[in-house]
Image (cartoon, grey):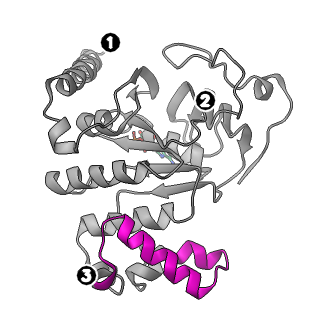
Amino acid sequence: MTEPAPSDAAAAKPASPAAPPTSAAPSAPAVAPPVVVFDRVTKTFDNGFTAIKDVSFVVDDMPGKMEFVSILGPSGCGKSTVLRLIAGLTPHHPASSGIVLIGGRNVVGPGADRGMVFQDYSSFDNRTVEDNISFGLECRGVSADERRTRAREWIGKVGLNVDRDAAKYPHQLSGGMRQRVAIARSLILGPRIILMDEPFGALDPATRLRMQDMLVSLSREAQATVFFVTHSIEEAVYLGDRVYVFSAHPGTILKEMRVPGPTFPAKEMQRKPEFMEIVYEIRDLVESLESSNRAGD
Ligand code: ADP
């Protein structure tokens, strides 16, 4: 759930993050408010540990397009904290200081405008594929007939087979298939923002590439902004329209890069020299960061 932002200076001027290397404010007034604004957001937990410090970025509304924001960084640098602040999930939400705006409004808790897909398979064990996918529609009071039609449509969209898979239970599915169900379950509700926390992290490399292709094909029709947390530089660069590279202790955005969108299937594109060049650039950055951490800088 989000609520209208108070009419204070910060809310009236959401596109003004404090420090580089975050994105600049749009030069002309935006038609719609930015999808997400983080303005000098810090999160310190009850035990005194600061997970992220002064994180600022703006993701503008891109009507008619599913924009991918990849979040890359070492374990523990606060990637999930950023996602969970957007989702409005405790104990990460609320921020200790700074402003988090979703569509120009303060976050007050979880809401149907934001869907989440986790790394661990989050389906209900006692529900079939079809009933898992239609769960959110059921909560919204959608009729059984419509639920069935829409769930079956989504089974196909995420690359599963209605006749073969609709009546299966999660334990009868591979890891990749379970993540397809999780993605369908989230996208069927048409969220404005999709938060994906290492959704392919547990999958083997070949399945992972196929899942990336599936996400790209879904992106052609969905109109949403995706925040995609990953450890894989290749995955971040392939899927991302932009990549935020985080540093740790405490987490902060080290670099924002605009990267070309996926124009070829994952396996093909990820072998191209121009793709590898971007990957190497980010890898060098991450390695220099790690070695400076080891040196105690
Ligand atoms: P990432 O997703 O990049 O691995 P997280 O956002 O999960 O990192 O966590 C960032 C840091 O905050 C980690 O060091 C983690 O141990 C710490 N952390 C996460 N949740 C809590 C909590 N509830 N209380 C205290 N520290 C936490």
Numbered mark located on residue 41 in the image: 2
Residue 77's quadrant in the figure?
A: top left
Label 1 sits on residue: 297
Residue 61's quadrant in the figure?
A: top right
Which badge, 1 or 3, comes first in the chain's sequence? 3
Q: Is residue 2 visible?
A: yes
Which marked residue is nearer to the observer: mark 2 or mark 3?
3
Quadrant containing ligand 1 reads top left
Secondary element under disc 1, as helix, strand or loop, is loop
Residue 117: percent from left, percent from top: 44, 57
Secondary element under disc 2, as helix, strand or loop, is strand
Q: The C terminus lies in which quarter of the figure?
A: top left
Q: CA distance from mark 1 to mark 2?
A: 24 Å
Tell me the kind of residue under disc 2. Val
Residue 182: percent from left, percent from top: 41, 65
Label 3 sits on residue: 172
Residue 80: percent from left, percent from top: 45, 44
Tell me the kind of residue under disc 1. Asp
Residue 121 sits above or below residue 140 on the image: above
Residue 123 sits above or below residue 167 on the image: above
Which badge, 1 or 2, comes first in the chain's sequence? 2
Q: Is residue 198 visible?
A: no
- For ligand 1, tell me if the residue under mark 1 lies within 8 Å: no
